Image: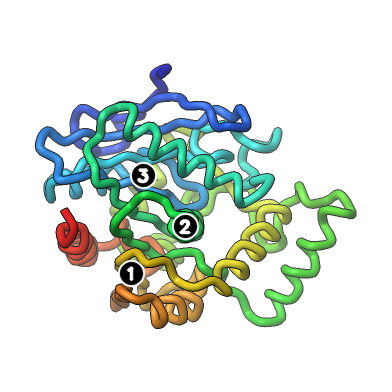
Amino acid sequence: MEPAPLFTEVADAPPGGAAHWVTAPDGLRLRVGHWPHPRARGTVLIFPGRTEYIEKYGRDAGALAERGYAAAAIDWRGQGISARMQPDRLLGHVNRFADYQADADALMAYAEAVGLPRPYLLLAHSMGGCIGLRALMRGYATPRAVFSAPMWGIRMQALKRSAAWGLSALSKPLRFSHLLAPGQSSAPYVLGADPADNTLTTDPDMLAWMKHQIERHTDLALGGPSLHWLHEALSETRALARMPAPEVPTLTFLGSEEAIVDPARITARMARWPGGRLVTLEGAQHEVLMETPAIRTKVLDAIAAHFAETV
């Protein structure tokens, strides 16, 4: 495998990390990375959210290492420094949501290729939670899963949801699906986020760290999604909501102040998931893994305990 950049100076991650380029079945170049552990109890496969990249999970990889786990992560197609899908690299776009499943398979194949120890345990955030749920439903080889604010629905008012469906559906036949979705900006949200009033985290230090990462490495940055991405996301989340839960023991975290994904979809899904447990974190925003030290510690301890039940 060809080595790829890993921006260690902004990752704040354990030593020994590495990244490589892999090729998806459709020929796209993807960046994957990992942090080994000399006595790992298993490997956590991290499915990032929309706009995210490997380095954003450096601190979580360190926390997982302290609890005995190696970690691997991916830049999904269209974000990080994996192949972008549009000439405007700040536009969030994917041809089909199903394409992300090839990326998920590439991450597991990479973990095997670099010799990371099994079991492979899933940790999926936001859009990664949508990808992860679909992966579990098709038999992704993981004995346990954790979801952080999973995108099993997008939070919108009813009228806006109807408009989003209509406009995004029309955008493809009328050939404007490459445009930004309404209300979105090509500027990365985190760059303009107010530490005292944002939808990501209540921790100003974590917000500043995320901002520093994309200021230092601008190629990591991503802005709002296209109308095509929006239609794909709405279609995929609706399809998943109609399917039964997979038979995989699962722990899901949801912040009480969630404003990005749909809490009702998460609550409904977890209420009918055998072997599933939902934990609501009082005062937390969307990024529960990038929250205050007290919240992060609670979340990471619970993740380790959940994974330890099968390791």
Location of residue 104 in the rendering, given as x and y in whole percent from the top left corner: 46, 44
Disc 3 marks which amino acid? Lys
Q: Earlier in the sequence, mark 3 or mark 1?
A: 3
Viewer-nearest of discs 2 and 1: 1
Q: Distance between the Cα atoms at labels 2 and 1?
A: 23 Å
Where is mark 2, residue-wise? 193
Which residue lies at the image location 57% right of the left edge and 69% below the top edge?
Answer: 154
| Occupied quadrant, residue 290 | bottom left
Which residue lies at the image location 10% right of the left edge and 37% below the top edge?
Answer: 39
Location of residue 92 in the rendering, given as x and y in whole percent from the top left corner: 62, 47
Q: Earlier in the sequence, mark 2 or mark 1?
A: 2
Disc 2 marks which amino acid? Ala
- SS of the residue at dot 2? loop
Q: Is residue 237 above or below residue 77?
A: below
Quadrant, the N terminus: top left
Residue furthest right in the image: 174
Location of residue 64 in the rendering, given as x and y in whole percent from the top left corner: 19, 48
- On the question of residue 301 being in view, the answer is no
- Number of the label disc, if any, that sits on residue 253: 1
